[in-house]
Amino acid sequence: MKKSRAPDLTHEVLQQVLNALDGWQRKLTWDLLLDEVEILTGHRYSRFTFADYPEIANAFSFKKDILRGTLPRTSSEPKDERLRVALEQVSRLQAKAERLQAENNLLSEQFVTWAINAERKGITMSMLNAPLPKPNRDQNKGIK
């Protein structure tokens, strides 16, 4: 029997994958991430599908780099459950902030590349920053 193809990634699924990576604390491989996403969404995606999305590929690499030098410290975990939950949330939010900062840095580099290439083609920054024309809304009023 032929396997059915997983649906295209929606914005919601993309956010689920990124949130899973933000909170990831154990060994990270593509297969483990795919297993987790299958549990979350009910669909099995491929590594190649995820690699096509720069947000996922960058977040995966970033989290992998963070996890390489860390070991879990079970002896220093707080006893109070509320404190443990709060610390886990802080850890997830810090990971998300770091991932977003890394993503922002990549986007800034991309912007600089585009600006330099545009300037080389004779397009000035003032041309790039010119406001977009307003849509002609009167044009559609006569059509019914």
Image (cartoon, rainbow, N blue to C red):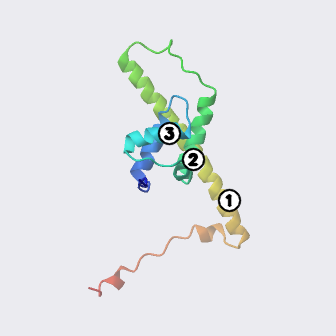
- For disc 2, the marked residue is 57
Q: Is residue 96 visible to the viewer in this orientation of the structure?
A: no
Dot 2 and dot 1 residues touching (CB under 8 Å): no
Q: On the rendered image, what quadrant is the C terminus found in?
A: bottom left
Amino acid of disc 1: Thr
Which residue is rendered at x = 36% and y = 85% of the image?
A: 139
Residue 82 circle label: none
**SS for dot 1:** helix
Which numbered disc, 3 or 2, marks the residue closer to the eye? Answer: 3
Task: Please identify the quarter of the rendering in which residue 90 is found.
Answer: top left
Amino acid of disc 3: Leu
**SS for dot 2:** helix
Which residue is rendered at x = 62% and y = 50% of the image?
A: 106
Q: Is residue 109 visible to the viewer in this orientation of the structure?
A: yes
Which numbered disc, 1 or 3, marks the residue closer to the eye? Answer: 3
- For disc 1, the marked residue is 113
Is tag 3's residue or tag 2's residue first in the polypeptide sequence?
A: 3
Residue at the left extreme?
144
- For disc 3, the marked residue is 33
Q: Is residue 128 above or below residue 72?
A: below
Cα gap from disc 3 to disc 2, whole angstroms:
12 Å
Dot 3 and dot 2 residues touching (CB under 8 Å): no
Coordinates of residue 95 in the picture (x, y in percent): 52, 34
- Residue 58 is left or right of residue 21, and the answer is right
Coordinates of residue 58 in the picture (x, y in percent): 58, 45
Amino acid of disc 2: Ala
Q: Is residue 19 above or below residue 6?
A: above
Coordinates of residue 92 in the picture (x, y in percent): 47, 32
**SS for dot 3:** helix
Cα gap from disc 2 to disc 1, whole angstroms:
20 Å
